[in-house]
Image: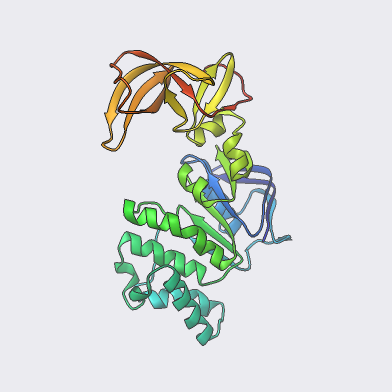
Amino acid sequence: MNVTFDNVRVERDRRLVLDVPSLHLSGGRTTAILGPNGSGKTTLLRAIAGLERPASGHISIGGARVASPPHVAVVFQEQVFLRRSVRENLSLGLRLRHVDEDEARMRVEEAAGLLGVPHLLDRRADRLSGGEGRRVSLARALCLRAPLVLMDEPLEGLDEHTYSRLLDELPQLLAAFNATTLLVTHNRHEALRLADDLVVLVDGKVHAAGSTRQVALHPGTSRVADVLGYAVLVAGGRRVAVPPHALRLGPGSALEFSMVVRDVVDLIESHEIVGEIGDVRVRVPFESSQSRPVLGQCVIVHAERWSELSDGVQAH
């Protein structure tokens, strides 16, 4: 189910919070809406869900302009449950959509099984742990089998173990329900791990949109590179974006930089140097077999991968 924005502007308290002249989100794929806090990501999701009315323009879902989408499942950032069992919370949306009782029972059990929470079905939903609640929220949305699933920071606030498991499992879960999924996140790693397509949103405006691979390999501007967590550096009169973990200690055949060492960190399984290239702070791994640099020392590092940017070489 395709989603298309046409001259959409959303205002709040007479302030423009979302300005999207044109955007097309392809059906049958997972698209991540990536941006810093306050960039308008949740507003964009709410506008698609019909919970936020644009001041101008329109949004089309499946080719039709709708004020309220006919069949959308939403996973909110806040976990909201009735003070009833998990089973009743999962069933509520199905009852409201007049799904047959046997079909509803089958869907609830299937979604609970896929999310690993069948043992929670008879527990009070408002007494779940954070990780359990996230899984139940996902199950509640997915058992609706909506053609469009909207997810607002679905992995936020989880402990590391639960986060890692859900990050690994979520792509297969979404594929199992064959839906178009829009995922809001401020986490670059989540976006690259989960999404087929990527939209970078900054200050309410789309700064990049395309396949995740295309945007990640060619961010185009320093604003997009910043959101992706890249180091924006100047080399040979060019501004370049260097991905995280692409800098290496010592000279190389590619781009080289002079870095001032500010700290050397022992991470037990590895070591890294924290330093500055110009006014940009970077982290560079180094092998235990290499000479340990001294604080304040100026060392040479090189980039194994980089992308040239189009917005000049002025100080950023």
Q: Residue, x 51% and y 36% (percent of image)?
A: 227
Please say whether residue 214 is visible from this viewpoint: yes
Q: How many marks?
A: 0
Q: Residue furthest front?
A: 289
Q: Looking at this view, is 128 or 259 the one in front?
A: 259
Please say whether residue 91 is visible from this viewpoint: no
- By what rule are the colours in the image chosen? rainbow
Q: On the rendered image, what quadrant is the N terminus found in?
A: bottom right
Q: Residue, x 51% and y 72% (percent of image)?
A: 143
Q: Is residue 155 left or right of residue 237?
A: left
Q: Residue furthest right?
A: 63
Q: Position of residue 116 (x, y in %)?
A: 39, 69
Q: Looking at this view, is 217 or 92 the one in front?
A: 217
Against 27, residue 231 (above or below) is above
Q: Quadrant of residue 295?
A: top left
Q: Position of residue 306 (x, y in %)?
A: 55, 28
Q: Is residue 229 left or right of residue 128?
A: right
Q: Position of residue 38 (x, y in %)?
A: 48, 41
Q: Looking at this view, is 86 or 276 the one in front?
A: 276
Q: Position of residue 168 (x, y in %)?
A: 44, 56
Q: Quadrant of residue 134?
A: bottom left
Q: Residue, x 53% and y 62% (percent of image)?
A: 174
